Amino acid sequence: MSNEKSEASDDSPSDSPSSPAGSPPTASLSSLMELENCVSNLSLAHEIIVNQDFCFKPKSKIPDSFWDCLQEQLSSDPPDYSLAVLLLQKVKAMLLSLLLPAQVRLRSQLDEGLDMELIQQEVNHGALDLHRIAGETFRVLELMRIDMANFSLQTLRPHLLPQAAQYERAKFQQILEKYPDSLDHTTAWLQAAASEEMSARGNPPHPGPFSVLNRAYIRLLYWDPHNHKYPESVLMDRARLDSLAQRIQTLVLETSVLLLTSTHCGGALPPLQGFVGKLKQSVTALLEDSQSSESELKEALVGLAETVLQQLNEALSANRGATLPQETQNLLRGQISDLWMKNNAVRILVGERVQGFLWATLQGGSTKSHPELPAALRLMSSELTELGTAFGRIVQFNQTVYGPFYQPILRKLLFSPGHAANAEGSR
């Protein structure tokens, strides 16, 4: 046994003076923990700045066993709740004193949860529910705590913004120094965008860095995760960009349906009050979460076609006293149902218009208003403008943070060594 132990000890990694030749270096536990902490802090700071809806969420409630114990202590026969009511009055007064004048919603919730008149009535009738009252009290306390944390978050965000870009850049630089290959996927992403941009232009002059970057960002909205590795510099925004990409696909389908419907109505939908809004709501509701598979989308579009025809005929009947001819109804039904195909001509047209709008949004920058919408997109103008604003915000902040990392990559891709100095000046 001693020999076996000795042999095992001789083979253990701790006794080896170095790793075997040719084996990759293994990161130590401390370095991995340091990296995890760095990425965690970087991610939190990035989330606060980029995600306007980021906020703290309430934790789970205190377990019922605590309230069972409290109720058992007060379950004398008959119970005397006079001190409990007095305590509740003081607790409520203290909570109200902590509220700011603008916290009207919390004040209303506190009055509703600790309605002292109702509590006194319950005491008089021997029906006081201490479990409910205590639960309401702590629920309001938790809401107050979260509300204060979110207020602090909103207050800090404008002060964090000026330093956020430098902070993220410095943190990423630390990662890059430890792991030099942390920009490999980013380089491939920019290289693919540069190749596409050069092909689109055909002849020289070569595209500029900003046009390549804009194309690269647009490509993220049509990303194929099976064929390409996601760029490291945009990883923290991937969930946001994937969500925007899904919204774009849904928006293209919704706009296509409305465009087809408008076309069969002579270029304009019935002018009845609320009709367009009702139709848009129906289209959005029926297409929501229906794109996970082609079969689901086909089924959803078939049902949507019937809903559109029903609402359209009702509106036309109320406005003109007649419905669409049966031949037109059959044509519209078939055209809406055919939108499941990715090579559908209407779907492609609308998709190109949406992409063109996003291109124009990026080229306009943050200081200019949104570009004018093509006629095909005006039925969904508010939704598209909101989407463009969200996309532009992500792109702008990413460029601010990672621009210094993109610059040498783009210079190498787009310019020969002799033109490198000119490339620097063009930025």
Image (spheres, rainbow, N blue to C red):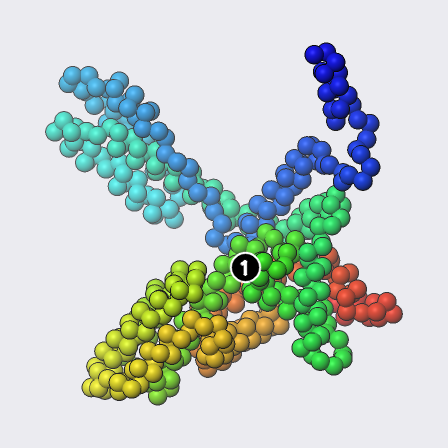
Residue nearer the viewer, 312 or 151: 312
Identify the amino acid type marked 1: Leu
Give the labeled residue for mark 1. 241
Residue 396 x/y as whole percent: 61, 62
Residue nearer the viewer, 333 or 307: 333
Does residue 240 appear left or right of residue 15 in this picture?
Answer: left
Q: Quadrant of residue 81?
A: top left
Residue in the picture at 47% in, 80% down: 345
Residue in the picture at 80% in, 34% down: 20
Secondary element type, mark 1: helix
When the figure is inspected, residue 35 is found, relative to residue 389, above or below; the finding is above
Residue 7 x/y as whole percent: 75, 19
Whether residue 421 is visible, yes or no, is no
When the figure is inspected, residue 263 is found, relative to residue 283, above or below; the finding is below
Residue 424 x/y as whole percent: 79, 66
How would you rate the neighbour count of disc 1 (Cα within 10 Å): few for under 14, some for 14-19, many for 20 or more? many
